[in-house]
Image: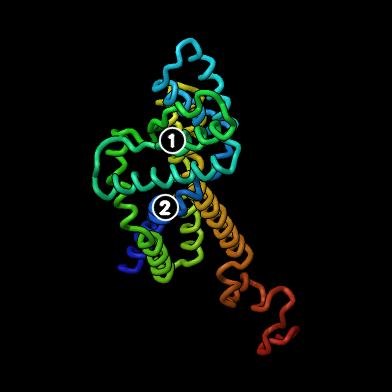
Amino acid sequence: MTRTLLAPVLLVLACLLVPLGTLSTWAKYEIGDSDRYVAAMAPLATQPDVQNAVADAVTDGVVRNLDVGPLQSTVESYLHDAVVSFTGTAAFQKAWNTANRAAHDAVQQAIDDDSSGPVTLDLAPVTEQVKRQLQDENVPFASQLPVPHTEITLLPAGDLDSLRTALHALQVAGPWLPSAAVVCAVAGLALAVRRRRAVTATALGAALGAGALLLALAIARSLTLGDLSDSADEAAAGAVYDALTATLRTTSWVIVGVGLAVALVSWLTGRRWPAGRRRGVTRPAAPGMPPDGPGGNLPMTQKEGAP
């Protein structure tokens, strides 16, 4: 009785730990690691939506601190074009990586130290590089351009407060949750009475758990972008969200695929080799038929035609 009850409990627990283990691994080795975070964000430097958002933010930040009289609109337009042009250079990629490394350190410090306030991406390194480029091209007023700490908010203070505890717990759990899922699955399958059915059910449960995580990520994306009114900011924020969760989504899809494949193979194997045939059990003969079937031999004790 204990074995019959314990096996399903362990297998259900293993399936529940699949999405949690995926999240904890991602939080530990993707969000918690500075190099991996920067590597995930690096491709965004070539995204047009992100480049336009950076150009708008840098231009607005400089113009607010610049007064050139009637040339204000001309300088603003020229500066915006210069920033857009700069976003296609290798120097922008380097400045982008520098800004994101600083942003990651701020995010991680907020998670570890329970610090308050929003987490922002400082675009001052980008502004500094644009100013140098304009000075090298001998553009008038280039030396007078200020380099303000223009910031893009990555996590508002309210969102950070709600996410801090969860992210911290997931990072502490790290690889222990996926390891616990594997241990529970192995132990549950070892105790299962009908092992093939248990394998099928566990594989389907793991696929279902990973699918639930994919659905949760899609809902979270919609809710996050729904709070943004500007379509340009929404496009850029969507690109950032997709970049940060790319590994999480890929891992979840792999689990879904593997789980469904294992369940299908287990089910087909069970259909092709029923329990009786696998164990070499001979079905009893029908009434009036010889034990070996319709073509079997008559019993030796009663010869055909004997009285």
Q: Earlier in the sequence, mark 2 or mark 1?
A: 2
Separation of residues labelled 2 and 1 (CA atoms): 18 Å
At horizontal 67% and vertical 78% (from top left) the residue drawn is: 292
At horizontal 44% and vertical 29% (from top left) the residue drawn is: 225
Q: Secondary structure at mark 2?
A: helix
Quadrant for the N terminus in the image: bottom left
- Say whether residue 17 is left or right of residue 75: left
Residue placed under numbered mark 2 in the picture: 34
Residue 198 position (above or below residue 31): below
The front one of 122 and 181 is: 122
At horizontal 33% and vertical 48% (from top left) the residue drawn is: 108
| Label 2 Cα crowd, 10 Å radius (few <14 / some 14-19 / many 20+) | some
From the top left corner, tell me how far across and down residue 280 is, in percent.
59, 77
Which of the 4 quarters of the picture holds residue 120?
A: top left
Residue 164 position (above or below residue 49): below
Q: Name the residue at the top extreme.
A: 70
| Label 1 Cα crowd, 10 Å radius (few <14 / some 14-19 / many 20+) | many
Which of the 4 quarters of the picture holds residue 156?
A: top left
From the top left corner, tell me how far across and down residue 254 is, in percent.
55, 54
Q: Secondary structure at mark 1?
A: loop
From the top left corner, tell me how far across and down residue 287 is, in percent.
61, 70
Nearest to viewer (mark 2 / mark 1): 1
Q: Name the residue at the bottom extreme.
A: 301
Residue placed under numbered mark 1 in the picture: 123
Which of the 4 quarters of the picture holds residue 13?
A: bottom left
Which kind of residue does numbered mark 1 sit on? Leu
Residue 19 in sight in this render: no
